[in-house]
Image: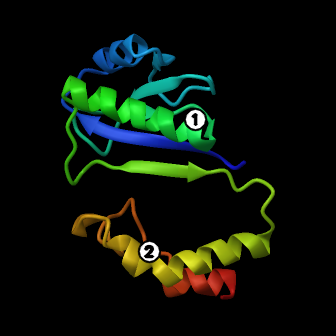
């Protein structure tokens, strides 16, 4: 089972209040200045891309239990009044350990094939190369480097 982690960017709550809310929901959470080395707790950190915002960084997750935990955190944040807008995002990091270079190139090619459709799930500000934090995988320079 492939492991994953998420980063949930939002605003409207103090970081300490986010930690308290997650703990009240039975989740391990810590307040830290940066992503923690504690792989078993949600780290609540500042977010430079969202003024007065925060980022809830998950521990290493996997399977349906991991997905359920992400849903629980989103519900806690929503109930407590956290807000999102076009500056915020939910980022998923997938463990690519064990993938060969060829397998990784295949993943990128398949993503590129459906990038336009996937982009329809995103606001305009996150599509293609409209945002400096979110770049297209269909750029010619990426293909040249991967020899696709």
- Considering only vertical position in the picture, is 103 above or below 138? above
Quarter of the image for residue 71 reads: top left
Q: Which residue is mark 2?
A: 136
Which labelled disc corresponds to residue 97?
none
Which residue sits at x=54%, y=75%? 111
Near mark 2 (Cα within 10 A), the count class, few <14, some 14-19 or many ≥20, is some
Which residue sits at x=60%, y=74%? 108
12 sits to left or right of 59: left
110 sits to left or right of 120: right
Secondary element type, mark 1: helix
Which residue sits at x=44%, y=41%? 7
Q: Which residue is mark 1?
A: 65
Q: Quadrant of the C terminus?
A: bottom right
Which residue sits at x=50%, y=50%? 92
Q: Nearer the viewer, residue 37 or 5?
A: 5
Secondary element type, mark 2: loop
Q: Nearer the viewer, mark 2 or mark 1?
A: 1
Q: What colour scheme has been applied to the protein in the rendered image?
A: rainbow
Quarter of the image for residue 101 reads: bottom right
How many badges with numbers are in the image? 2
- Considering only vertical position in the picture, is 144 above or below 49? below
Which x, y percent locates residue 116? 38, 80
Which x, y percent locates residue 124? 23, 69
Which x, y percent locates residue 98? 81, 57
The reply to whether residue 90 is in sight is yes
Which x, y percent locates residue 51? 22, 38
- Considering only vertical position in the picture, is 96 above or below 103? above
Q: Nearer the viewer, residue 5 or 141?
A: 5
Near mark 1 (Cα within 10 A), the count class, few <14, some 14-19 or many ≥20, is few
Q: Nearer the viewer, residue 128 or 103?
A: 103
Mark 2–mark 1 distance (CA, rounded to whole Å): 30 Å
């Amino acid at each position: 089972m492939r492991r994953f982690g998420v980063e949930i960017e939002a605003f409207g709550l103090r970081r300490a209040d986010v930690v308290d809310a997650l703990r009240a929901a039975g989740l391990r959470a810590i307040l830290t200045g940066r992503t923690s080395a504690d792989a078993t707790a949600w780290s609540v950190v500042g977010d430079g891309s969202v003024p007065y915002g925060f980022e809830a960084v998950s521990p290493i997750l996997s399977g349906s239990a991991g997905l359920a935990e992400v849903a629980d955190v989103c519900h806690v944040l929503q109930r407590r009044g956290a807000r999102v807008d076009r500056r915020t995002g939910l980022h998923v990091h997938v463990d690519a350990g064990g993938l060969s270079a060829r397998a990784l190139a295949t993943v990128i090619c398949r993503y590129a094939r459906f990038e336009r459709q996937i982009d329809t799930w995103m606001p305009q500000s996150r599509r293609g190369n409209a945002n400096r934090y979110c770049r297209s995988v269909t750029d010619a320079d990426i293909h040249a480097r991967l020899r696709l």
